[in-house]
């Protein structure tokens, strides 16, 4: 007769046999309520009543739905032929979320008078709710239920109840005090009873106090139902339609109620600005992990914990990922090779590279490590660095993009990229500062070298402090396009604080020192020309500085612009991702059709990501520009001469003749 009841009881039996599947997060969510239950409440089961229809006390521990209702005695069997409060409680538990969101102000009274009708002295029959009250409850909640294909139950169709103006006594929702109701004497069947909840009750208040009256199995069922539908639910074994339908309506109703509220509880969705419903992580994305709040999704600047992004179905398709990996592999190879050549050139003739040019060597060394990290990540074909297998709330094992510090390969690559990437930016500032000291303040090589320890202190300490802060916060995100891990990919505040702000600051400082140095060089050039001295070498030096500065500053500006573009467009991209995967994730239809931004895939310009990766690595290639000269050729010639001379000495003809003897 009551399909919902059968399915609910069936789900509870299955949940009882699989209680070991409760996650730590769910256990923690209800731990406090369960402790209170064990201390103050032991469920009681009333026996079946006989046909005398005697009044019995309304037990709100068994029927929490009827707490604070305007009567305290009931009688059974009720209109639905249920013979005890315990039997009625199994059905009423399904409606608790709808009561708390108050989709209709009379729903609570209607359901209580239906499942636990009031018992009135001198009136032997079971009172029924009036048809008009049923229609009020139905009109308030049915619109939300229809959106999720949830019909108003046939067994409580309003035509089954007596009319307010009919001959049979019934219960309506007109104001009527509890005291006067208890004293009422019913002279005949034409009396209509009026009940209401106590005036102190806040009908619009949403809370989670009703959780304390649910068993752990009911709590698990409610939580899973509330967070989203499932294609196949191994916990309860119920089909998606039966498992989700009532609570999908609850989600929609909660959004409507909370549109008029300012203070709400996190258990239910909230209505955000511009009629946006708060995102609730679907079971297919809700992860079961040992570390809490490491995984999260940023949905319109609302950080949903324990919610991950899958590796196979993310913002980018497989062809884009494959192209991006190949693209980055090429640039990373060029960056690593170029910087390695620069470092080797420095090692074979260190005396040639003195201050103010020596910071170029340290800058190249930093980019060599960054290039190596991108080389490792982009050459990984099985996503073992950026993806990790986790179980979701549906008990399915899938790969999700790594977040946090739990995956060592991801963390190591992040440390390489972030630490040496930021250090390279500081060495750029040091380079421009030393140029300014040499050109503007007439410092010599030795004077600058005497303070070089401070340069190293700043270049290695500042990135180290920021790196430690990120590791402590555990805010590391896997980047599926590059195969490495970065920070600020899903948290725009981190992107602004740990990427955009420092890079912009270093760029501005370097540009200021560079500009001051150029002004000084132009003054020196004018003085030399005025005195009749040749300025060819000085002009050539100025050209080299100018070209090198452009080669560094232009890519740096482009990278910063790309970061600005990402942080400003991220919410739209996530909305598009959720919208295109709404069926797979079983998102509520209201969230998809009425709330999400109307944008298309074109807003995510894939080529800009490719430009960003190229500009991140191109500085490593152009850093070798400073050593592109005949001096470098001479240095390598001398090196090979020494090498082959040493080879001839140890492995030459003399050695061969001795070996022959």
Image (spheres, helix red, strand yellow):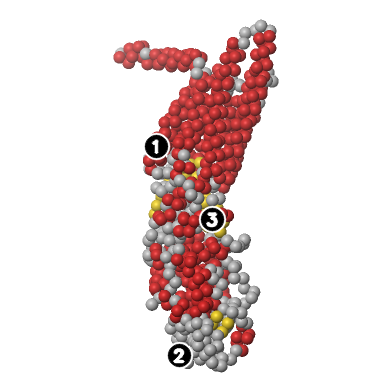
What count of labels does the image hold? Answer: 3
- Is residue 185 or residue 494 the one in the foreground? 185
**Rendering coords of residue 65 (x, y %):** 53, 75
Locate the C terminus by quadrant: top left
Give the x, y percent position of residue 505. 62, 34
Dot 3, how many residues are within 10 Å of its Cα: few (below 14), some (14-19), or many (20+)? some
Residue underneath mark 1? 323
As drawn, 570 above or below 290: above
How packed is label 2: few (under 14 Cα within 10 Å), some, or many (20 or more)?
few
Real-space Cα separation, disc 3 to disc 2, in angstroms: 52 Å
Residue at left offset 52%, top offset 41%: 566
The CA distance from mark 3 to mark 1 is: 35 Å
Q: Residue 530's image quarter?
A: top right
Which residue appears at 39% of the width and 63% of the height? 240
User: Which residue is painted at 65% across and 22% down in the image?
Assistant: 517
Q: Residue at x 50, y 75 (%)?
A: 135
Q: Element at badge 2?
A: loop
What SS does tag 3 mark?
Answer: strand
Q: Which residue is mark 3?
A: 276
């Amino acid at each position: 007769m009551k399909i919902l009841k059968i399915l609910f009881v069936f789900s509870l039996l299955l949940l009882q046999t699989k209680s070991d599947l409760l996650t730590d997060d769910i256990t923690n969510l209800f731990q406090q309520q369960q402790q209170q239950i064990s201390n103050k409440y032991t469920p009681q089961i009333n026996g079946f009543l006989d046909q005398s229809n005697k009044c019995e006390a309304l037990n709100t521990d068994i029927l929490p739905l009827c707490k604070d209702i305007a009567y305290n005695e009931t009688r059974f069997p009720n209109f639905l032929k249920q013979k005890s409060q315990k039997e009625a409680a199994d059905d009423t538990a399904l409606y608790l979320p709808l009561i708390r969101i108050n989709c209709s102000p009379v729903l609570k009274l209607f359901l209580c008078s239906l499942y636990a009708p009031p018992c009135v002295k001198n009136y032997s029959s079971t009172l029924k709710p009036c048809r008009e009250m049923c229609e009020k409850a139905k009109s308030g909640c049915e619109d939300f239920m229809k959106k999720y294909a949830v019909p108003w139950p046939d067994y409580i169709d309003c035509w089954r109840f007596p009319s307010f103006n009919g001959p049979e006594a019934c219960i309506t929702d007109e104001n009527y005090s509890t005291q006067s109701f208890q004293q009422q004497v019913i002279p005949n069947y034409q009396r209509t009873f009026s009940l209401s909840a106590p005036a102190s009750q806040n009908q619009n208040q949403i809370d989670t106090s009703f959780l304390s009256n649910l068993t752990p199995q009911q709590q698990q069922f409610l939580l899973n139902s509330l967070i989203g539908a499932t294609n196949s639910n191994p916990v309860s074994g119920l089909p998606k339609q039966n498992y989700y339908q009532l609570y999908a309506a609850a989600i929609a109703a909660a959004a409507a109620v909370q549109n008029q509220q300012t203070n709400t509880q996190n258990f239910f969705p909230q209505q955000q600005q511009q009629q946006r419903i708060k995102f609730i992580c679907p079971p297919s994305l809700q992860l079961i992990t040992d570390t809490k709040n490491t995984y999260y999704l940023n949905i319109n600047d609302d950080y949903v914990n324990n919610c991950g992004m899958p590796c196979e179905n993310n913002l980018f398709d497989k062809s884009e990922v494959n192209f991006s990996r190949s693209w980055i592999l090429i640039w990373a190879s060029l960056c690593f090779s170029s910087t390695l050549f620069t470092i080797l050139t420095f090692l074979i003739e260190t005396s040639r590279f003195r201050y103010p040019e020596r910071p170029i060597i340290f800058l190249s060394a930093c980019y060599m490590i960054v290039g190596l990290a991108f080389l490792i990540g982009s050459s990984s074909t099985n996503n073992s660095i950026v993806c990790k297998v986790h179980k979701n709330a549906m008990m399915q094992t899938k790969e999700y993009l790594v977040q946090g510090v739990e995956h060592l390969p991801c963390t190591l690559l992040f440390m390489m990229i972030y630490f040496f990437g930021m250090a390279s930016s500081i060495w750029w500032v040091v380079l421009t500062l030393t140029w300014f000291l040499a050109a503007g303040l007439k410092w010599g090589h030795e004077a600058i070298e005497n303070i070089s320890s401070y340069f190293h202190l700043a270049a290695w300490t500042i990135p180290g402090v920021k790196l430690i802060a990120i590791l402590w916060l555990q805010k590391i995100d896997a980047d599926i396009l590059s195969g490495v891990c970065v920070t600020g990919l899903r948290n725009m505040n981190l992107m602004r604080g740990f990427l955009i702000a420092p890079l912009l600051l270093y760029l501005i400082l370097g540009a200021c020192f560079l500009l001051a140095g150029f002004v000084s060089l132009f003054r020196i050039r004018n003085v030399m020309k005025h005195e009749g001295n040749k300025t060819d070498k000085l002009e050539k030096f100025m050209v080299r500085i100018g070209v090198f500065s452009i080669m560094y500053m232009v890519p740096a500006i482009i990278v910063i612009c790309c970061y600005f573009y990402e942080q400003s467009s991220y919410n739209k991209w996530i909305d598009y991702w959720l919208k295109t995967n709404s069926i797979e994730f079983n998102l509520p239809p209201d969230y998809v059709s009425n709330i999400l931004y109307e944008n298309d895939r074109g807003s995510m310009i894939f080529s800009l990501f490719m430009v960003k990766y190229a500009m991140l690595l191109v500085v490593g290639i152009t850093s070798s520009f400073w050593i592109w000269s005949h001096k470098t050729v001479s240095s390598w010639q001398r090196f090979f001469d020494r090498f082959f001379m040493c080879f001839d000495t140890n492995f030459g003809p003399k050695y061969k003749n001795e070996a022959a003897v």
